[in-house]
Amino acid sequence: MKKIKTVIYYYSATGNSLYVTQELQKAVKDVEIRSIVEAMQEDKPQVNAECVGFVFPMHYFGLPLQVEEFLQKLTILESPYTFAIATCGVPYWGRPFVDAEKILKEKNRQIHATWYVRLVSNYIPWRDIAADWQINIRAWLAERKLKKIAGAIEKREHHETWQLLRKFCAGYHDKWKGKQQEIDTNFQCDKAKCTSCGLCERICPKKNILRPNGQPVWQHDCVECLGCLHICPVKAIDYGEQTKGRKRYRHKEIKAAELIRR
Ligand SMILES: Cc1cc2nc3c(=O)[nH]c(=O)nc-3n(C[C@H](O)[C@H](O)[C@H](O)COP(=O)(O)O)c2cc1C
Ligand code: SF4
Ligand code: SF4
């Protein structure tokens, strides 16, 4: 059987990481893209390709929890070249690649190239979505950077990137991890706005939302991807008081239906 040239695994709640993956699929020869959420459902996910890539958002200066779990579960049969890309609002401050490398090293695999791609921060409990002009500038810069990254991947170049304040970031990330079961108690749904469309339930990568009476009820197994919050078409979902009146975000090239993975 012919070996696939490049497989890119992606994880994406609001489309930034899926956009990056799709751009690389256009720019690099023979790329197959796979959703991490779908691949997680396999008993023993494995990959055998000349090049394997991972594209994901930075969550609390580190890896999204499902990406960490997936890297632990995945068997990389053979891959001469591996890369990882973290999309983010503020690059360089964090340690997603340190953590990814550590997991792969335990399986005798390494990551040859890492990059941040700065787009828009979707973390609206902290602050509102950037202004349109900022979004446009970042999109333009990201497009240029992605062309360079695609060239480097084709040439199998090695690339390292800054990961500043690693120790501080590890502490911050671990503290967040410890709060998993309580995170979704911050979500609330405005019944007057909710149309019971079910999109929040379908978009949740953890199947953490049930709708016994039409509106979402969170089941305390949330990875805080914020997919439900951003994708609700009528802004019926809020995260505490902080997100009230703030904008919602989805990458303009990505449709909501493309973010449903199960
Ligand atoms: C829980 C959470 C934590 C985040 N932490 C960071 C962070 O530490 N640094 C950063 O630059 N962006 C952070 N972000 C923003 C995302 O990394 C960024 O918006 C990413 O591009 C979203 O990708 P997606 O659209 O593919 O989900 C965070 C987002 C979430 C939901
Ligand atoms: S996505 Fe929004 S409108 Fe649709 S069911 Fe969920 S909360 Fe209600
Ligand atoms: S409940 Fe919302 S924030 Fe939590 S994992 Fe599901 S979609 Fe993501």
Image (spheres, rainbow, N blue to C red):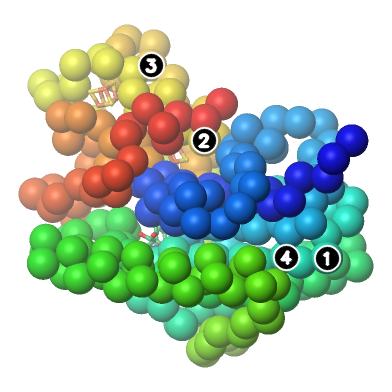
Q: Are marks 3 and 1 in contact (CB under 8 Å)?
A: no
Quarter of the rendered structure image containing ligand 3: top left
**Disc 3 residue: CB within 8 Å of ligand 2:** yes
- Binning the other alpha carbons within 10 Å of mark 3 as few (below 14), some (14 to 19) or many (20 upward) gives few
SS state under label 4: strand
Q: CA distance from mark 2 to mark 3?
A: 15 Å
Considering only order in the chain, which callout, 4 or 3, is on the residue closer to the N terminus?
Answer: 4
Where residue 141 appears, as percent x and y from the top left, is 30, 73
Q: Which residue is mark 4?
A: 82
Q: Amino acid at mark 2?
A: Pro
Q: Amino acid at mark 3?
A: Arg
Residue 205: mark: 2
Q: Are marks 2 and 4 in contact (CB under 8 Å)?
A: no
Q: Which residue is mark 3?
A: 211
Question: In this orientation, which residue lies closer to the viewer: 3 or 92?
Answer: 3
Determine which quarter of the picture holds residue 234: top left
